């Protein structure tokens, strides 16, 4: 079996759900080898199929931007000639992927929503043009470097050997430019991460700036909270939570749009959600063209009632 | 004196019916195009940097004949000069080939900073700034939400998902900026008139010493095998709230086993 390198994201050692999804996808192609910058919970990595765990440690990984990480991963790619390299399609993941692909002269696919292997051929699926088209693509050169979006597979446990191997790499001075002078962690909302959540409840202009009802409904469902560009531009909700072309693209099992008209810019970020619900006062809002279920009404009345009803049913 | 190159892309209008050509590339001719909205923020930031000090902004694009529209818009906003790299061999280039052409063109220009938008509004990979930086051997600070230039030092704030980072760099640098950097200006009448007199250089691959065989569809490291329009969503059930809208919503959720 051939080796598949999987770049693991593990803030404070805790392996993220998208990383477990990558390990699951890697098993379709070959034997997953986890690549960890710093340290991660190795038990979890083995539980989800990592045969090998390469750990790399260098102060440069945290002091500088992606340069050192990309150099290290590229050296690993040169050394192992893997069948594929899988990374999460986050801002940092895509940047590392781009540099590694160019260094190793390998084709790059970003924002994959599915990866399938048939014999030696790896075919990726991407959702393009605001989710209006799906594209099937293959890499024709090198070790395919594929950045995969969260929620592209359900993580499945399958025990791997989890053999830990410390890897030392040489980081060039050229990679150690653009120093991070300060990094301030954002306060955790206590809600699921927006791009990883199974349910997203979002609010737009129709909230009038008050997200109380939207947040309460989200919490009753254990959902992440999102916001439209109109709400973010008005300063009502932080940009981190913006769903749309210039924010996050989400593809949850359930998306509930409240007081959001559904402009192309927003649709680009949520159109591939499995089930879509909208609450809007305007019965002609374009969002209603997308929905599986819609309520024409005031979210200030509809959401509190829905929140109570969910709580009642959940007991 | 800060010399800034802003790389911009001519893209099909996102509000039009975007589609593909017979060779599986993005249709850039049959659909009306324009300067990518996200690149307007890059032009704006470059202009603000030189307005706060001294300098010059050159706008650079790689694309078909119509891409001249994107350069013109940036010139109307206030960029000083333009470069349009146009060559039939470039058609169908992937991000790697595009970054090669851009890097070669940037090397030919005198520059301190290279500024990009955060991503294009068509392919939207968001990796070209990083690839150009890699080719130029420079650091890239992507997704900047605030930029300050003082002398040789550039300070950038990045507002990420889990943390807000401050980054300091000196020397040549590649940046990409988000829409959080601030509203882009509209061209003024004066700007529109002035743009007509501004210099736009036309370059081909030969001018950049780029081998035609290293770009274009055949040189791409990835291949689009097929594309398919997403099936239209089947019309859902719409109810009007008559005091029971919330309850009905939850009934639907229950029918789909979400509660």
Image (spheres, coloured by chain):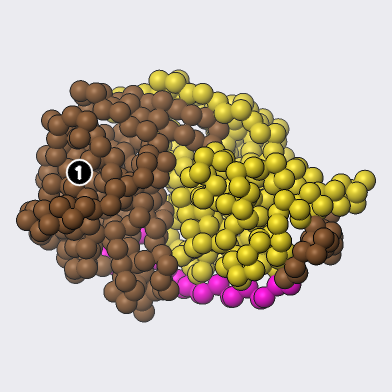
Chain colours: A yellow, B brown
Query: What segment is highlighted magenta in the picture?
Result: B215-237
Query: Residue at position x 70%, y 41% from top?
Result: A212
The answer to which of A214 and A313 lies nearer the viewer is A214
In which quadrant of the rendered view does residue A190 lie? top right
Side of A306 relative to A129 (left or right): right
Side of B190 relative to A40 (left or right): left
Q: Position of residue A206 (x, y in %)?
A: 61, 53
The answer to which of B185 and B65 lies nearer the viewer is B185
Q: Position of residue B238 (x, y in %)?
A: 72, 70
Q: Chain of mark 1?
A: B
Residue A93: in magenta span: no
In this view, which residue lies farthest toward the bottom?
Answer: B22
In which quadrant of the rendered view does residue B27 lie? bottom left
Side of B233 relative to A312 (left or right): left
Residue indicated by mark 1: B5
Query: Residue at position x 41%, y 25% from top?
Result: B166
Query: Residue at position x 85%, y 48% from top?
Result: A308
User: Is residue B136 visible in the rendered structure shown here?
Assistant: no
Q: Is residue B54 above or below residue A153?
A: above
Q: Position of residue A54 (x, y in %)?
A: 55, 33
Tell me if mark 1 has few (under 14), some (14-19) or many (20+) residues whose alpha carbon lies within 10 angstroms of its own.
many
The answer to which of B161 and B135 lies nearer the viewer is B161
Secondary element type, mark 1: strand
Residue B222: in magenta span: yes
Query: Residue at position x 51%, y 50% from top?
Result: A229
Q: Is residue A162 above or below residue A109?
A: above
Q: Position of residue B209 (x, y in %)?
A: 11, 54
- Quadrant (top left/top right/bottom left/bottom right) for the C terminus of chain B: bottom right
User: Is residue A15 visible in the rendered structure shown here?
Assistant: yes
- Quadrant (top left/top right/bottom left/bottom right) for the N terminus of chain B: top left
């Amino acid at each position: 079996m051939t080796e598949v390198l999987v770049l693991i994201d593990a803030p404070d050692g805790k392996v993220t759900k998208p990383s477990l999804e990558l390990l699951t996808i890697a098993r379709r192609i070959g034997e997953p080898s986890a690549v960890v910058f710093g340290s991660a919970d190795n038990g979890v990595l083995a539980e989800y199929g990592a045969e090998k765990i390469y750990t790399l440690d260098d102060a440069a990984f945290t002091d500088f931007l992606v340069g050192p990480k990309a150099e290290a991963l590229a050296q690993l790619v040169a050394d192992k000639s893997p069948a594929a390299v899988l990374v999460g399609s986050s801002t940092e993941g895509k940047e590392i992927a781009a540099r590694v692909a160019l260094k190793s002269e390998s084709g790059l696919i970003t924002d994959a929503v599915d990866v399938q292997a048939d014999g030696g051929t790896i075919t990726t699926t991407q959702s393009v043009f605001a989710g209006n088209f799906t594209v099937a693509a293959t890499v024709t050169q090198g070790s395919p470097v594929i950045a995969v979006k969260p929620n592209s597979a359900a993580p499945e446990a399958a025990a791997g050997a989890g053999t830990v191997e410390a890897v030392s790499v040489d980081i060039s001075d050229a990679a150690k430019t653009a120093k991070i002078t300060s990094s301030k962690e954002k306060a955790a909302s206590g809600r699921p991460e927006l791009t990883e959540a199974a349910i997203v409840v979002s609010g737009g202009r129709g909230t009038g700036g008050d997200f109380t009802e939207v947040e309460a409904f989200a919490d009753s469902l254990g959902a992440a909270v999102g916001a439209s560009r109109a709400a973010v531009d008005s300063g009502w909700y932080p940009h981190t939570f913006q769903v749309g072309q210039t924010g996050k693209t989400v593809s949850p099992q359930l998306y509930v749009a409240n007081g959001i008209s559904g402009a192309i810019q927003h649709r680009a970020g949520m159109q591939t959600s499995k089930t879509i619900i909208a609450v809007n006062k305007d019965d002609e809002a374009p969002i209603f063209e997308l929905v599986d279920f819609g309520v024409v009404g005031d979210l200030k009345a509809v959401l509190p009632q829905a929140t109570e009803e969910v709580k009642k049913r959940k007991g | 004196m800060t010399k800034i190159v802003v790389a911009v892309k001519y893209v099909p209008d996102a509000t039009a019916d975007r589609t593909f050509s017979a060779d599986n590339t993005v249709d850039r001719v049959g659909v009306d195009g324009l300067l990518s909205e996200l690149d307007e923020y890059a032009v704006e930031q470059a202009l603000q940097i030189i307005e706060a000090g001294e300098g010059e902004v050159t706008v650079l694009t790689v694309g078909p004949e119509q891409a001249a529209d994107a350069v013109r818009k940036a010139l109307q906003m206030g960029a000083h000069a333009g470069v349009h790299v146009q060559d039939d061999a470039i058609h169908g280039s992937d991000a790697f080939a595009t970054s090669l052409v851009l890097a070669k063109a940037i090397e030919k220009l005198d520059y301190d900073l290279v500024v990009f938008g955060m991503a294009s509004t068509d392919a939207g990979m968001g990796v070209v700034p990083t690839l150009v930086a890699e080719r130029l051997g420079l650091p890239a600070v992507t997704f900047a939400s605030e930029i300050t230039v003082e002398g040789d030092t550039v300070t950038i704030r990045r507002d990420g998902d889990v943390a807000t980072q401050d980054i300091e760099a000196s020397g040549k640098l590649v940046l990409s900026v988000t829409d959080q950097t601030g509203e882009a200006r509209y061209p003024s009448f004066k700007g529109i008139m002035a743009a007509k007199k501004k210099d736009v250089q036309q370059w081909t691959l030969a001018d950049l010493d780029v081998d035609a065989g290293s770009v274009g569809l055949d040189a791409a490291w990835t291949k689009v095998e097929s594309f398919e329009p997403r099936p239209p969503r089947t019309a859902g059930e719409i109810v009007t709230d008559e005091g029971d809208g919330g309850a009905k919503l939850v009934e639907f959720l229950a029918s789909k086993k979400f509660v």
